[in-house]
Image (cartoon, helix red, strand yellow):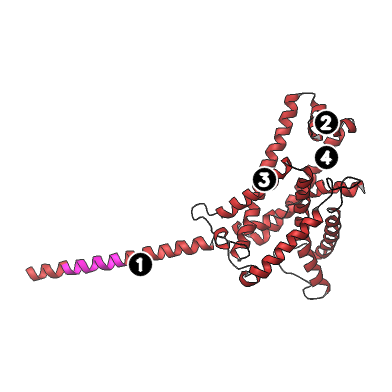
Amino acid sequence: MATMVGLLQSFFGMCCYDAPAHMTEEMKNASKEAPRAIVMSVWLGAISGFVFLVSVFYCIGDIQTTVMSPTGVPLIQIFYDSTGSVRGTCAMASMLTVINVLASNALTAEGSRSLFAFARDHGLPLSKVFAKVDPKSRVPVYSILLCLVVQMALQSIYFGSYTGFATVIAIATQGFYVSYAIPLFARLLARFTAHARVLPGPYSLGKWGIWINLIGFIFLAFSTVTFNLPSIAPVDKNNMNYTSAAVGIIGLVSLLTWIFDGRKNFTGPQNGIMMNAIEVEHRGHAADVAVREKSDSESGSDNVIKDRTEALALR
């Protein structure tokens, strides 16, 4: 049970392998390169994470002292016990901070693209605003700002309540894992009901694909259940895991949004790339320029003919 409860943090670190999928509209040869990037990130994350964890476990001292560290962060205590230097500890902790900042930027980028795509399909309030793409930077600026504000608001919960912040982490992780499980379930259902035994594409796992999907779905289903378990016993209102309640509220809000807005306006995924709006605008601008140039050319030709006519009349 302790292992199952402790899986949440490690599972949260295993999220976001799907980030390349949210950036496909800005990638070349996305049908091949996006899956390759996802698989490569899994391998890189697994190898680097394994090396890091083995190193940390090897350097850990007294467990009780580490847990009750005055820093409030056991990992920082491990750094200090290993280096015996405040400067060395700060340097190593700063490296993690840089990694987290870079990861946050990547999360903002992929999250904003998801918001943009959902708004483009008329699935959000104020969809017209969040579906706009800036013609100069060629990025969905309003979607990025919305994603940034929401992230800052959720992260600020940590200053008021650790239980509330842990619930946010659990909701985010569960949301990621459910989103991974749904397409796997759809693929398995299509395979075993003979609706689509083979899905052609430039990137395939071959005969092992269906079994890897099955193992992945079972793992995700098991993981999703563990996210709702409390981490401290006995359970009271202060340490309760409110993930299931929060997910229920989110589901209710989503249902009401669908009833009153989504079923009327949501169009579903559309073909095309993110830059279509810009391309259309540029094409319209180019067409206007061409019309003006043609008009100026015709006007110039008329003036030349008129001048020649007047010159002949004078002769």
Disc number lying in front (2 or 1): 2
Quadrant in which residue 203 is drawn: bottom right
Q: Secondary structure at mark 3?
A: helix
Q: Earlier in the sequence, mark 3 or mark 1?
A: 3
Count up the numbered dots: 4
What whole-number distance in Å separates the C-alpha atoms at marks 2 and 1? 73 Å
Residue occupied by mark 4: 53
Q: Residue at x 75, y 50 (%)?
A: 168
Q: Earlier in the sequence, mark 2 or mark 1?
A: 2
N-term-proximal mark, 3 vs 2: 2
Residue 275 vs residue 258, the one in the foreground:
258
Disc 4 secondary structure class: helix
Q: Give the number of the mark in front: 3 or 4.
A: 3
CA gap, disc 3 and disc 2: 26 Å
Q: Which residue is mark 1?
A: 291
Residue assigned mark 2: 69
The residue beneath circle 3 is 104
N-terminal-most mark, 3 or 4: 4
